[in-house]
Amino acid sequence: MEYDRTDLSLDRLELLRIYGYGLCMGAADALPGVSGGTVALLLGFYGRLIAAVTALTPRRAAAVLRGYRSDRRPRALEALVEMDLQFLIPLGIGMVTSVVLIAGTVSSLAASHPVALFGFFTGLIAASAIALGRSLEWSSSKHVGVAIAGATLALLVAADIVQLPGGGRAVIFVAGAIAISAMILPGISGSLILILLGQYVFLSSELSAFVRALGELVTGGSIGAAVGPGTTVALFVAGGLVGLVTIARVVRAALARQRELTLVFLVSLIAGSVPAPLHNIGETHAWTTETIALTAAWALFGAIALFALEYLVGGFDPE
């Protein structure tokens, strides 16, 4: 589909359609199954998404900020068109809407029904690795070596053998850089990265607390209640912005040069991440026969849900 990026005007129906795209992408990225990038491929706007994100550069942002001067307004308008903000803004609002809604549900379920939640996530992750891996080449020694490297890295991170450098706020920033850049890539979900890094439940809770504190401000709540979780959210978003102009570009360059091997690595990361949600169950429940059986049942349900979605949309293709 061709888009006229010289026209900054959008009718309400087009805005609503793009917002709906954002809702779908946000829902996919807020759950550790199919990525937002894969959803963009399925819905037919992945090319426009990549072009718009790639156009987000400091040079263009500076040109927009200098638009307050009349002699620089033509260049500012040109930069706005190049960045395709009339597409990215409603898309981003839709994504944020989905993520906020799902984060609140995740925070509640993580506290009340961790076996069901993380068992379901385990099934989603395992099924998505199978669904995405079907179309890839695994026969050559190079492909097998890359697959082993990706799965091993994920397993080491999930077991806390390999950790992010630093701690506290630095981890939140780096997690944002990796996770948000993953959101636009076909195959791997941003929430899966957060589960792998052990930040998913914490960040979901912080986002929910921030939104709740903002809502309470209307009824006379304290602004201090929003500062703590708001700082966490701001750090994560800042890391995400850095990731979009650094990590995401590196991965896109790898896809351009060695697409098949890069996709094998990404899908292998997903496969190696299958045990990651189980650590959350182990923190609150002993691994009794009943716990194992319930976890397996919810994992089966998650796998069935993913394969049913794959069937309905005609298959997931990381290409």
Image (cartoon, rainbow, N blue to C red):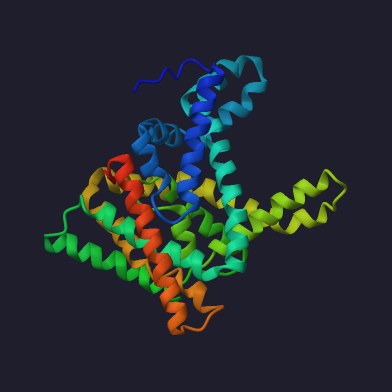
Which residue does the image show at 82% across and 47% down from the upper left? 217
* Res. 162 in view: no
Classify 70 as above or below 305: above
Which residue does the image show at 66% across and 19% down from the upper left? 69
Work out which residue is located at the far left of the displayed protein and give it.
140
Which residue does the image show at 34% across and 44% down from the upper left? 252
Residue 190: give x, y in percent of width and height.
46, 53
Residue 257: give x, y in percent of width and height.
24, 45
Identify the image quadrant of the N terminus.
top left
Q: Nearer the viewer, residue 116 or 74?
A: 116
Left or right: 256 as drawn, with respect to 40: left
**Image quadrant of residue 206?**
bottom right
Left or right: 144 as drawn, with respect to 184: left
* Res. 292 in view: yes
Work out which residue is located at the far right of the displayed protein and give it.
220
Left or right: 216 as drawn, with respect to 44: right
Classify 182 as above or below 14: below
Q: Nearer the viewer, residue 102 or 71?
A: 102
Q: Nearer the viewer, residue 37 or 60?
A: 37
Left or right: 257 as drawn, with respect to 198: left
Residue 68: give x, y in percent of width and height.
67, 22
Residue 49: give x, y in percent of width and height.
42, 34
Number of marks in the rendered image: 0
Which residue does the image show at 31% across and 58% down from the upper left? 129
Identify the image quadrant of the C terminus.
top left
